[in-house]
Amino acid sequence: MAKHEIIIPKMGESIIEATITKWLVKEGDVIAEEDPIVELATDKVDSEIPSPIDGTIEKILFKEGDVVPVGEVIAIVALEGDDAGEEPQKEIPKVEIPEPSVAETPETQTPVEDNSADDGRFYSPLVRKIAKEENINSAELASIQGTGKDDRVTKNDILIYLETRGQQKPQAPAATETKVTTTPPATPAPEFKDGDEIIQMDRMRKLIADHMVASVQTSPHVTSFIEVDMEPIVQWRKKNKEAFMAREKQKLTFTPIFIEATARALRDFPGVNASVNGDKIILRKDVNIGMAAALPNGNLIVPVIKQADRMNLAGLAASVNDLAHRSRENKLQPDEISGGTFTITNLGTFGSTTGTPIINQPQVAILGIGVINKKPVVVETEFGDTIAIRHRCVLSLSYDHRVVDGALGGMFLQRVAQYLENFDTQRTA
């Protein structure tokens, strides 16, 4: 009887391993092609893997909770037929492992061994590869705080460590001084009282928490604000949304309009469409805009609209509606939440006037959109100033002050506002 090997498939850019969260079959089960067989989780998205063939589950090689590299065999399926003794069939996907960032390190250190770790922690092949290339020895690797499962050091952990490694050089104490070693005070544990409810963070919430902490530790955040007159856009949308629905079969929300203006501004100011690698600034060729989407369980996910600057308003509306819907249904593919160069978060969805969003690493800026409200404002007319009721919105831009200074951040934010306030109300949606 022929056999087929089920492997961990390639699951998107930079993903080299996955955690088996749940087996949907057991040994002896008969399966058909496209039947779901296992649920996998990565640091970006959860996926349900279907069977590529008909057969019977003969052997399950990993248990739930195991971390398995991409391309590894996780199960063997017996196929119907008379090919006894035939070797298992397997198609190994190509695994693209990105080059790690390079930092200057002392050449006298002993690199960590690829197949062992003195502290007993599990290190993925990519983490060991980076450690070897950066001359990080076993003791130094063990000192890196891990944010992965069971305190495992992730790629992001070691890259963040490399960015700050060697920046602080100890100074020799003066001859008359006595060296005193102090231990920083530990964070006090909270006190629990009767009636308090303790909720364990789920996997996604822990990943979000780690990502936010890492972002603040990596980038010095500065936030600028600007108020935008949205009256022309509000009236144009009110006039065109029904015709747009009839023609495009899509809801016309404000989000694609904000994305269109942002994409144009990113083309004007490429320094905001960038990333940082040590002392180098990477100006991204593509404008890939992520939009933060709230999930029903309260968590967040950021699907990415690739090459948003090349899409018209109808195309942006279709992408926004599709990604938002599949985000809520947990049906996004891994490559649909990777590769972003800039992020937008709609703070106004829940009535917030404005906010100071945290940068989505490794990007250098994020735009927050406040609620669109009617306000009395001073309007200049040919007869002088007057008070009018206008729809207004506050935009906030948080940016990485290592590479985006106040002038660049302010000019970019002002350009977004200009594109919105000068919106062509004669255009057809």
Image: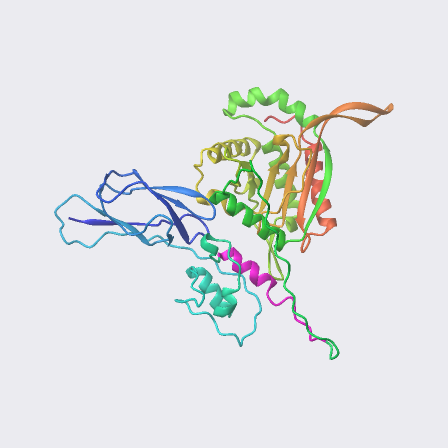
**Vertical position of residue 62 compared to residue 47: above or below:** below
Q: Residue furthest right?
A: 384
Which residue shows up at 67% across the image and 45% down it? 398
Q: Is residue 376 magenta?
A: no
What range of the chain is rendered magenta?
154-173
Q: Residue 51's spot in the image, x, y percent?
A: 29, 42
Identify the colour scheme used.
rainbow
Which residue shows up at 61% across the image and 32% down it? 257
Q: Residue furthest front?
A: 194
Quarter of the image where the C terminus is located: top right
Q: Residue 125's spot in the image, x, y percent?
A: 42, 61
Q: Is residue 157 magenta?
A: yes
Q: Nearer the viewer, residue 392 or 169?
A: 169
Which residue shows up at 61% across the image and 68% down it? 166
**Vertical position of residue 66 compared to residue 425: above or below:** below
**Vertical position of residue 83 compared to residue 331: above or below:** below
Which residue shows up at 75% across the image and 78% down it? 176
Q: Residue furthest bottom?
A: 175
Q: Residue 157's spot in the image, x, y percent?
A: 53, 57
Q: Quadrant of residue 244?
A: top right
Q: Is residue 37 left or right of residue 177?
A: left
Would residue 161 be seen by someone viewing this image from the given angle?
A: yes
Would residue 69 be seen by someone viewing this image from the given angle?
A: no
Q: Is residue 371 left or right of residue 55?
A: right
Q: Is residue 244 left or right of residue 8?
A: right
Q: Residue 91's spot in the image, x, y percent?
A: 29, 52
Q: Nearer the viewer, residue 136 or 228?
A: 136
Q: How many marks do you count on the picture?
A: 0
Q: Nearer the viewer, residue 288 or 20?
A: 20
Q: Nearer the viewer, residue 98 or 221?
A: 221
